[in-house]
Amino acid sequence: MVKLIHTLADHSDDVNCCALSSSLLATCSLDKTIRLYSLSDFAELPHSPLKFHTYAVHCCCFSPSGHILASCSTDGTTVLWSAHNGQTLAVMEQPGGSPVRVCRFSPDSSCLASGAADGTVVLWNAQSHKLYRSGSVKDGSLVACAFSPNGSFFVTGSSCGDLTVWDDKMRCLHSEKAHDLGITCCDFSSQPVSARSIDDQLKQFTEDWSEEDVSMWLCAQGLKDLVGIFKMNNIDGKELLNLTKESLADDLKIESLGLRSKVLRKIEELRTKVKSLSSEIPDEFICPITRELMKDPVIASDGYSYEKDAMENWISKKKRTSPMTNLVLPSVVLTPNRTLKMAINRWLETHQK
């Protein structure tokens, strides 16, 4: 049952947008301010409200780590704030000075998109705060924006009802009249709609397959008759990739030369696929400690993402320094990086087809 927990009534004018991090709620308003609240008790933070904009604030959003807050306004600026202390980190002026209606961080926090009333959209480098790429739509104000989970493309929506899909180089991939009236919001799901199970979608590499996964693979390859033999010998994904001509004949007792040859061909295809997949992993998906694909990424207080088990082990050995910067960690709290995890899972789905 849904029930009202708390009501916040601090803004003096209409609230245009609200955003959540793992610990904070941000709201922005026509009253030119942004307010920050703790999710634990909904108390307003000491450094709230945030004041800089000279006109209405239309949108606000947190970076995936939750450390940075972005806001945009009719005054033609997009501002970055420290969520921790409210300090102004950067002021980015929209080319032409048009009112900025929407802003969004990319999943890896490398870029920030801002869309304006004149139809311009800008990708800012979130680290240097410099303009990276820009583009524009023909008609209407840009009022909605969303990045795909892996950050390889994003979509903008206009007040004329148009949707435009852009890649990370600001090339227009697709545009269509999606609605008769203006678009107010757009978003991506974390996973595509499909008949596959969640467990299947989260499978990483063939090495991670269980005995049941191997059985399913055998059936898919037309080798259903071998399921019993493989199960009896406890062949999981790792064992599957290590099978040889000799082990198929001597250990699994597969007498047919043709059948052994077919199994070996299919296994070699899997080996090639695993090798190809491993070589193409984006750097941001690799744990700096293990140098392996992250399965459960967390954000440390140094702002970098690590594999949870690896970082916990690092800290447990009384290493209070950052693995990346070698500076002392301000805190040992690890925050789940759900956005990065979704991006990794989406990338895996694409490369496992």
Image (spheres, rainbow, N blue to C red):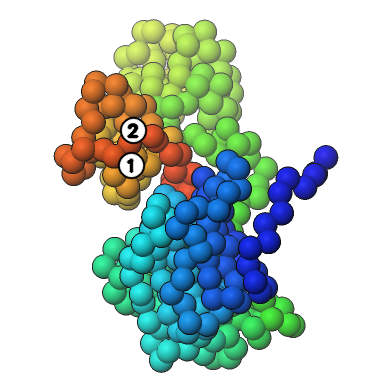
* Mark 1 surroundings within 10 Å by alpha-carbon count, few (fewer than 14), some (14 through 19), many (20 or more): some
* Mark 2 surroundings within 10 Å by alpha-carbon count, few (fewer than 14), some (14 through 19), many (20 or more): some
Instruction: Determine whether label 2 and label 1 are within 8 Å by CB.
Output: yes
Viewer-closest of 328 and 267: 328
Q: Which mark is residue 332?
A: 2
The residue that disc 1 covers is 301
The residue sitting at the left extreme is 326
Residue beneath the point at 39% across and 66% down: 80
**SS type, badge 2:** loop
Quadrant (top left/top right/bottom left/bottom right) for the N terminus:
top right
Where's residue 45, x and y in %?
Answer: 50, 53
Q: Amino acid at mark 2?
A: Val
Residue beneath the point at 68% across and 61% down: 9
- One can see residue 183 in this view: yes
Where's residue 30, x and y in %?
Answer: 61, 77
Q: In the rendered view, would you say 112 is above or below 98?
A: above
Where's residue 42, x and y in %?
Answer: 61, 48
Residue 158 image-quadrant placement = bottom right
- One can see residue 68 in this view: no
Q: In the rendered view, would you say 129 is above or below 277?
A: below
Dot 2 or dot 1, earlier in sequence: 1
Q: Is residue 146 left or right of residue 280?
A: right
| Marks 2/1: CA–CA distance | 7 Å
